[in-house]
Image: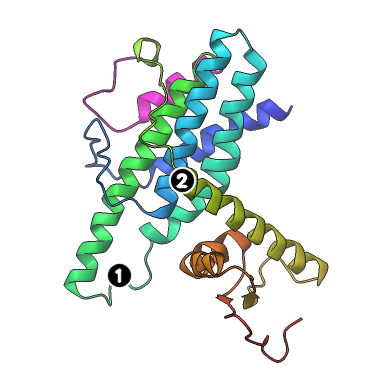
Amino acid sequence: VGYRHFCNKVWNATRFGLRYFGDDYTFSGSLRLDMPFAWEDKWILSRLSQCAAKTNQAWEKYEFANTTTATYSFFLYELCDVYLELLKPRFYADHYDQADEAEKKRIEEDRIVARDVLYICLDWSMRLMHPLLPYLTEELYQRLPPSPTKRESITVASYPTAVYGWVNDVVEKEMEVVSEVAKQIRSEKASLGLSPAARPKTYLRHLDLHWRECLTKLSERISRMALSGEVKVLAEGEHAPKGTL
């Protein structure tokens, strides 16, 4: 039953992701390492490379359960639960209409990068999962936008291998901390009996200067992942505002 639901998730999430491309999108065929990747782009590419490495290693050792676990965990818990959620504000920027020309250009360039990274994630996911879900992945692969590297069928497409230039241990560690913070905020909301739709302002405190700066830089991502309102990191020695719990 669990994997049947997973197939539904793959179908729905992929079709949802395809809406970001538009009718005139064509993938160039590769990602340049000097592209202006956002923080979440660097993280998902690192996780995708790790997934490919684990999957290939599992196939070589005939450890089919590990292949299933690696692809399942990446697609469900990292691509769907985190990356697709963090993409939304990049494609639906509320301030786009009010932005000046320079800012609009920056937003458009960021969307180009986001589309290319999303294409790689969906393309690789289909190919990595194909031996396990042959019919579903073939159908969704055919729906991907055109690309010079796209084959007439997923059955003759090359199987992805790790790209070690994508691996980023620093960003992965940051995501571990950010995910734990977001989890604790969601838990606190539940313990206070707040409704899922509530978006309370949240204050964070960390004793380490490096992590205070990091969490401040990533406060908007934390807010989205935690389903909270504005997230503010308190300075060293700063008292919590009145009314905080």
Disc 2 versus disc 1: nearer the observer: 2
* Mark 2 crowdedness (10 Å alpha carbons): few <14, some 14-19, many ≥20: many
User: Which of the 4 image quadrants contains residue 230?
Assistant: bottom right
Magenta region: 132-153
From the image, which quarter does the N terminus lie in? top right
Residue 143 is a magenta residue: yes
Residue 81 is a magenta residue: no
Amino acid at pointer 2? Trp
In this picture the colour scheme is: rainbow
Q: Which residue is mark 1?
A: 96
x then y, percent, for residue 219:
52, 68
For residue 179, side relative to residue 96 (left or right):
right
* Residue visible at 24% across and 58% down in the picture: 108
User: Which of the 4 image quadrants contains residue 121?
Assistant: top left
The disc placed on residue 43 is 2
* Residue visible at 30% across and 53% down in the picture: 111
Q: Is residue 229 above or below residue 53?
A: below
User: Which of the 4 image quadrants contains residue 60?
Assistant: top right
Q: Which residue is at the front of the view, 235 or 65? A: 235
The number of callouts visible is: 2
* Mark 1 crowdedness (10 Å alpha carbons): few <14, some 14-19, many ≥20: some
Q: Is residue 184 above or below residue 164?
A: below
Contact between labelled residues 1 and 2, with CB atoms less than 8 Å apart: no
The disc placed on residue 124 is none
From the image, which quarter does the C terminus lie in? bottom right
x then y, percent, for residue 49:
45, 31
Amino acid at pointer 1? Tyr
Return the residue found at the far bottom. 242
Q: Is residue 180 above or below residue 162?
A: below
